[in-house]
Image (cartoon, helix red, strand yellow):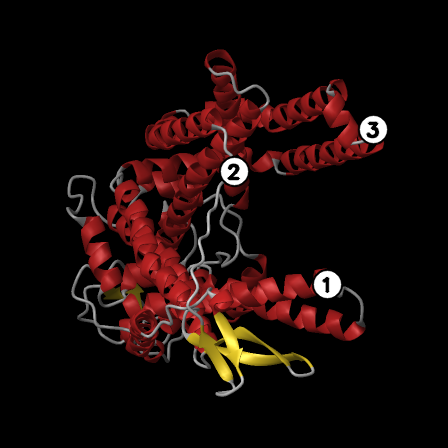
Amino acid sequence: MAADDGDPTKFAAISSSSSPLLSKPSTSALDSPRRSSDPESDPTQFLQISYNFGPRPFKDVAFLLLFDLFVFSTFGFGVFSVFHRNTDYGDSSSFSYDLASTSCVKASTFTSVSNSYWSDPVFEKDLIWTLVVTLILSAPFCFVVLLLLKHYTKQIVYACLPLFVLFPVFFNVYWFVACTLSSSCSDALPLAYRVLVLVFIFLIVGVIVWIIVANWHRIELTIQIIGVASDALSKNLKLFVVLPLLILGLVVYYAPVVVFLVFARFNGEFVPREVDGDEYVCEWKEDSWVPAYYTLAIITMIWSLAVMVEMQVYVISGAIAQWYFSKEDSMPKKCIRSSLRNAFGQSFGTICLSGILVGVVRVVRAIVDNAREENPQGIVNFALRCCANALLGAFDYLNKFTINFAAITGESYCTSAKMTYELLRRNLLSAVFVETVSTRILTGIVFVLSAAYAVATWAVLRGVSSLGVDSYLVAILAWLLLTVVLAFFVHVLDNVIDTIYVCYAIDRDKGDVCKQEVHEVYVHLPISRSTRSALIPNALNA
């Protein structure tokens, strides 16, 4: 079926000099060469792409070494800050100015500090138990949702679509009536403000309705894409063990860094500062290297977080690609283990490079958004924001499937970005659009399921506990926790959809069909119009 999607001889292929992957016919990531429409070109230089099951060379080693340098420097200076700390930090009352030595000296005083706070033991107990039960139930909850999306995708989507509107409307009306009937709430929030919030939420509901109506013609395609992705994910259930362990590993990795940041503040001394005339007070002054260490540690933490996110994408892509390019009766064993080995081994430098680029882009985007909120006026600010948004958009365009492709082929970051763009361009596929409606629908399903769970939690608390009004707060926190877990599930499913899209493009490029059920769905995705208009003249000239 993929062979009918388009004649591959109509489009130009990448030259073998553009990538090491395309210059080594013997590598396991390549199949037989493909002929070009240009009669003067060498047909052996146009080779086909597939999953690289063989040994992979190390790529982007410079960024691997740079990342290691940041990590070892952060831990090295952190250990130094622990042993070099000043134990008198925070005890400024024990220091006084000495006129003879013109410095701050410690007096022999003893200070006892007693902190006490009030808390409600019933509220704490019910809150902790509710969150623990929610966290325990979230794993089977995700598994049930995955099975429902695999076997009953259409029923689940069409059942949840009305609830995308009904749930917000119900909660909006409920809080308005409850706040009006409550004297304390009505006194704290006047009627005019309540009406304003009510109307604002209804406007948001109107936008949701408009989005559903505008994308109604793509609902069926979205249902099929979600079903295919759910089936692929169900064949790799161990991802739900590996991916949370990566997050747990990041938390364990963060713990000593946070401790080092705390102890870094203890490095300094008390110095005198003139206040009024001849009066001096002793104040704490950090060592000159402490701000630099804070900068280093924060950059390392941001980079590490981005590396962990990109590594998750890499592992998902590697596992799903092995499933896609394998025959039904020869599913590769330990595919997730091999993907992890490549992620922590030969491709770790590529992941580090992708992580630092994604981290820088997100920091710049946050700075641009913050500047727009603080100072929205001025033609210069407007021009700078436009330039920044254009550059960020260009990066998103090139980075969309880069890590997915690197996980499949084992290529470097820059080569993967170029080859992905050329692969999609040759096959009239968009580098930006896969199926954005699927993400919106999955997000809506997450909201509906977590909201229903929150309502059930509130009902149980009202029946078995004496929390009263605090039961609303506990239910909201349970809703937030389940939403975070289900949002992670959606994130994994989105990456599965993107990976299958790249694998489908590789199949289409080779004129092959590895998974018939995938081709029957993805063939209906819209063709990239800009690419089509650019390639039609070349096809006519050929």
Q: Residue at x 23, y 73 (%)?
A: 58
Provide the residue designation for mark 2. Answer: 443
**Above or below for 205 versus 15:** above
Q: CA distance from mark 3 to mark 1?
A: 30 Å
C-beta proximity under 8 Å, tags 2 and 1: no
Q: Please state the horizontal and vertical placement of residue 442, each as a whole percent of the image.
A: 49, 36
Give the side of residue 313 with respect to residue 391, left or right: left
2 or 3: tag closer to the N-terminus: 3
- Residue at image point 41% right, 61% down: 306
Residue 271 badge: none
Q: Identify the mark at residue 191; answer none if there is no mark.
A: 3
Is 283 rendered above or below residue 115?
below
Please tell me which residue is depicted at 52% across the width and 38% down the height of the picture.
Answer: 443
| Residue closer to the observer: 163 or 2 | 163
Left or right of residue 502, residue 98 in this image: right
Disc 1 marks which residue?
A: 374
As drawn, the residue found furthest toward the right would be 192
